Amino acid sequence: MVLIVRVLMGVIKDRHGTYYARKTVPAKPTGLRRAVALELGTAKPAQSHLKRSLGTKDVRDANVRAKPVLAEFDRIIAKAKARLAATTEAVVKRTSLNDTEIKRMAEYVYATALKEDEALRFSGRLELLGPHGENVNADAHGDILRDFQQQFAVGDVSFAEQRAQNALAGFGITLDPSCTAYHSLCIESAKAFLKALDDIGLRYAGAVIETPRLAGSKALDDHREGRTLQDALDGWKRHRARPKRTVDEFGRSVDMFIQLHGNMPVMAIKKTHAIEFRKALQDAPRHRTGDLLRATLPAQAAWGREHPDEPRITAATVNKQLGGVQSICIWANDNGLVPDDVQWTDPFSKLRLPEERSERTSFDAAELQQLFSAPIFTDHRFPLGAHGAAGFWLPVLALFTGARQAELGSLTAANVRTDAETGVALLHFVTERARGKRVKTDASERVVPVHPDVIRLGFLAYVEERRKADGADAWLFPSVAPDRGRAGIPAWYSGLAVTCARRA
């Protein structure tokens, strides 16, 4: 009888038959290998592997001797990560985690341990022993489990610290090791790791224990192409041409959701995930400078909770971010990214916050007189921020049409036509998705006569100049056209357009 025995992961035989313990130092986060070299005090600029001879050619003895060595390797890497985090200025170091984050990272620890075991079982790295002796590989596993259980029983969770560090790195979080949240994460990681070791033991007994497929982890990618939230965003972008501003806004919303919950399959997003996302958005500060500009949503929310007196982002902004993710999820369901046999409901439904009504009021006649007495209208002296002709014509058109700023900013020469029967000049407000032109609703597509005073001011002559310069489809105001975004629209025009739109 021949007994097949596996060697513990990280235990390797050299060419002379002697076993040694070896662990690869992760390449990420950047600088970790350099930090490990500093931790060891070596002259090397970076340390890619940790290696130590076990001084034996017996596989059973090697498995026993390897346990404390590999644990020491884990501690070295954990200390190096802490060293790196302490010297990394570009990352906001957090001092808290919410319950959801700790739960997700504990799940990560559990799934990672099972995946490592699964990879080793099918790796082909087997060792053949003679006909005597029992299954020492299963015995070695049992010894490890009992050792860790005994450590946990007296409150020692150091055996799981490296796995907690790996989970933090996997979720892109830098956490202060001295804070309470770090200790809580280590405790939950220890519980998850012990549970994983229990289940690995059941595998030795012949039980089929599936490795969970966790969202948000590259190492645990479930390979279900086209089903994750990121896949849905990518598909939505490819589906048809969309305004750059909309693409950027939806992409930002999805990025923040993924920062909090990971890249989840759309069908797995539940109401609780959406509520937690809303809560994190509500905790995020309105004004961000320095490191907060690059911080993830969980880091922003944590900072906001630690600074309760700082103003938060508005309800309108929260609703915009919720709406971005909601739109992508609905698109995914409508376009087959959610399996047909899954009963999907919109998790973001009815989650929008009540928004404060604007305190802006309409201009009165005196205010309009003051506004249009500016030199740009009386002497054609254009200030630096006027964006050329847009600074003159946009306020005038807003006053006489009541149209929205985006509608006016996206007008083309082709949108100005003269009716053949009446000879009246008309403005056509229509959607042209390929060019990023849009109206707010289908009912907003309309035709508005050009006011005689606007014609008297030379608007039709200006339109003809734009046709001659750039063709029949030329943007009337290229400096603020959809392909340039709305950021360049003059500030005074924004307020006037909104006011006139209300009055119309």
Image: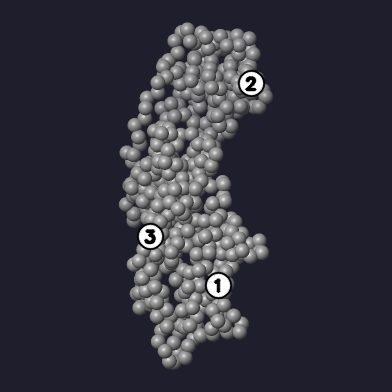
Q: Secondary structure at mark 2?
A: helix
Looking at the image, which residue is at 53% across and 42% down? Answer: 291
| Residue 54 or residue 373, whichever sits in front | 54
Looking at the image, which residue is at 40% across and 80% down? Answer: 139
What numbered label is drawn on residue 22?
1
CB under 8 Å between callouts 3 and 1? no
Q: Amino acid at mark 3?
A: Ile
Q: Amino acid at mark 1?
A: Arg
Looking at the image, which residue is at 41% across and 17% down? Answer: 361
Position in image of residue 305 (x %, y %): 40, 41
- Which of disc 2 and disc 1 is earlier in sequence? 1
Q: Which residue is mark 3?
A: 187
Question: Mark 3, mark 1: which one is toward the viewer?
Answer: 3
Q: Which residue is mark 2?
A: 384
| Residue 360 or residue 488, whichever sits in front | 360
Counting other residues with Cα less than 10 Å from the Cα at mark 1, is it few (<14), some (14-19), or many (20 or more)? some
> Is residue 106 depicted above or below 357 in this figure?
below
